[in-house]
Amino acid sequence: MDAAIDATAGQFELNEDQLAIRDMAGSFAAEKVAPFALEWDKAKHFPEDVIRETGQLGFGGLYVKEDVGGSALSRLDAVLVFEQLAHACPGFSSFISIHNMAAAMIDRFGSEEQRQRLLPKLTSMEWLASYCLTEPGSGSDAAALKTKAVRSGGNGSDYVLNGTKQFISGAGDSDVYVAMVRTGADGPKGISTLVVPKDAPGLSFGANEHKMGWHMQSTRQVIFDDCKVPAENLLSGEGAGFGIAMAGLDGGRLNIAACSVGGAQSALDKALAYTAERKAFGQSLDRFQALQFRLADMETELQAARLFLYAAASKLDRKAHDASKWSAMAKRFVTDTGFDIANDALQLLGGYGYLHDYGIEKLVRDLRVHQILEGTNEIMRVIIARHLIGR
């Protein structure tokens, strides 16, 4: 791994522990994910058994505290894991990212009783978790969500939920759903967070969506129809949900950016191998200067994206005052760059790049959604601009 540059602390290289984390994730991905990624994509197969295996490596709670089975890694450590997993399959890596975002919310905002009750099964991957924020009528405007949660039962011992969540990764396969719901008035102050178990009465799921990419993981609606959830599953009290959701998104944006770096690196690797082997006009393609220039630009842009990502992760680790701005900038720049590199790689392979068996078109499809989820890249520009002009 090339040296990275921290935004404020000068130049550094990955230390021995980080190299070990990176290599462990890379070895697992190369053995357990990469050989099967195209097959999973074609069959739209959710590899639940392989996903659960990552719990043995500590990937079920990467930045969850150790007392409940977490690995207590830094954000920089974690992006190394997601990058390596995404080199094998961005869809696989992104699901691990979403699970970790949900687990981290419980670790950070849950009571001690909630942490001890829920997290050991999440960090071990005995339970898989999904994050439920988006709704059919509220995507970028998350504060406008409509799913209602009303107290019921003796002494308000339960919440009854009604509403629908849209575009939920892992819906129907996950065991736990960290859901943002409305317990109060319109706006962000009326939003709360509930941990909903899969077996909750009144919880159901829509049909698996037909998507452009991420075929190996399900994407369904999560439907609450008089869904009963114990009040003991409320995180941090009523009205805290919007803050919980936004706190989780800074890290989630870095994770998805890391998935873009890993996918882009895979695309570049495939393009290098192809242009070295394929011959035209008596020489391999990588002997033509025009293609060399394209490869050189792809490598330069990839390394710039990687350095930006590592700098932003370091900011978040240090709780820097501008960490949210850097997370938004990294998400915007890295996911745009990752998609462009994969698309350029497809062009370099010509007609073969368009074929499923070569793996490039899958990377293009998988990386495209990274520019949309965890906040669209247009919303990232809004966040960045607000920081710049002091709003």
Image (spheres, rainbow, N blue to C red):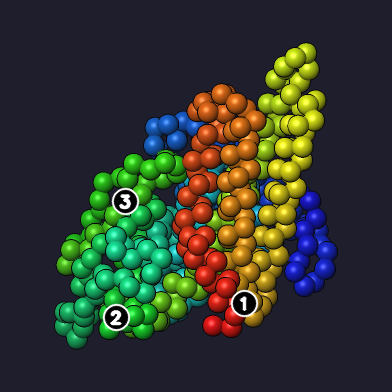
How far apart marks 3 and 2 lie (CA) works out to: 26 Å
Q: Secondary structure at mark 2?
A: loop
Left or right: 250, with 160 as reference point:
right
| Location of residue 22 in the rendering, given as x and y in whole percent from the top left corner | 68, 51
Q: Residue at x 55, y 66 (%)?
A: 381
Label 2 sits on residue = 186
Image vertical order of residue 86 relative to residue 140, above or below: above
Q: Secondary structure at mark 3?
A: strand
Is residue 198 at all visible to an observer of this figure?
Answer: no
Label 3 sits on residue = 220
> Residue 296, which numbered label?
none
Q: Amino acid at mark 1?
A: Leu
Label 1 sits on residue = 388
| Location of residue 282 in the rendering, given as x and y in whole percent from the top left corner | 78, 13
Q: Amino acid at mark 3?
A: Arg
Label 3 or label 2, whichever comes before in sequence order: 2
Q: Quadrant of residue 127?
A: bottom left
| Location of residue 110 in the rendering, given as x and y in whole percent from the top left corner | 43, 77
